[in-house]
Amino acid sequence: MRRIGTLKNEQQARRFHDYLLSIGVKSMIEQTDEGWPIWVYDEDQVEKAREEFDHFQHHPDEDRYAEAAREAERLRKLEARENAEARKRMIDMRSRWERPFFRRCPVTFWLIAISIAVTLLTQFGQPSHPLLNDLTINSFELNGKMVRWHPGLHD
């Protein structure tokens, strides 16, 4: 960002600032003890802005500067609308990660909860528990140290 010059009053500074915006030069003005300095953001546009500044100092009442105010206002409204649309598309991850676990990952939460419930109901997977046979695809029987499998889906 480069300073291209200083104007004495706010009205002229705003008028020139609007003109720069209307010709596609992004700039900034601020109030200081010296007056109203004009700052240009893009280094590539500094020369063009300085030439326009010199012309403005000699001819501040030209019609093109008055017409630039309307164009600058239109451009500001357009930029504000684009910024509002961009904010709508933005996702704030801070608020998403602050939510409770079951709200962030409901499927994972319910899979964990069901797994814990089955583990507790089957007494940590005891082979003799009748519920364990109902929760498996193939049924089986325990006879001493022997396991008898019944292939296929059970009744």
Image: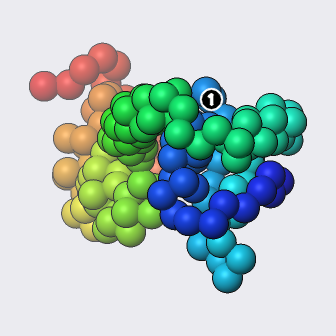
Q: Which residue is found at the position 20% from the left and 52% from the top? A: 130
Question: How dense is the environment of label 1, judged by Cα within 10 Å: few (below 14), some, or many (20 and up)?
Answer: few
Q: Quadrant of residue 20?
A: top right
Residue 66 image position (x, y, % from top left): 45, 35
**Figure disc tally:** 1
Q: Residue furthest bottom?
A: 33
Task: Please name the colour scheme applied to the rendered image.
Answer: rainbow
Q: Quadrant of residue 35?
A: bottom right
Q: Which residue is found at the position 66% from the left and 60% from the top? A: 7
Foreground residue among 88 and 79: 79
Residue 93 image position (x, y, % from top left): 45, 56
Q: Residue furthest top?
A: 152
Relative side of 37 to 67, left or right: right
Relative side of 123 to 41, left or right: left
Query: Residue 128, can we see it?
Result: no
Query: Residue 63, can we see it?
Result: yes
Q: Amino acid at mark 1?
A: Gly
Circle 1 sits in a helix, a strand or a loop, which is it? loop
Relative side of 86 to 136, left or right: right
Foreground residue among 57 and 36: 57
Q: Residue furthest left?
A: 155
Residue 154 image position (x, y, % from top left): 20, 25
Relative side of 79 to 77, left or right: right
Foreground residue among 131 and 27: 27
Q: Which residue is found at the position 25% from the left and 41% from the top? A: 135
Q: Quadrant of the C terminus?
A: top left
Residue 2 image position (x, y, % from top left): 83, 54
Q: Which residue is found at the position 42% from the left and 54% from the top? A: 92
Residue carrying label 1: 24
Q: Quadrant of residue 36?
A: bottom right
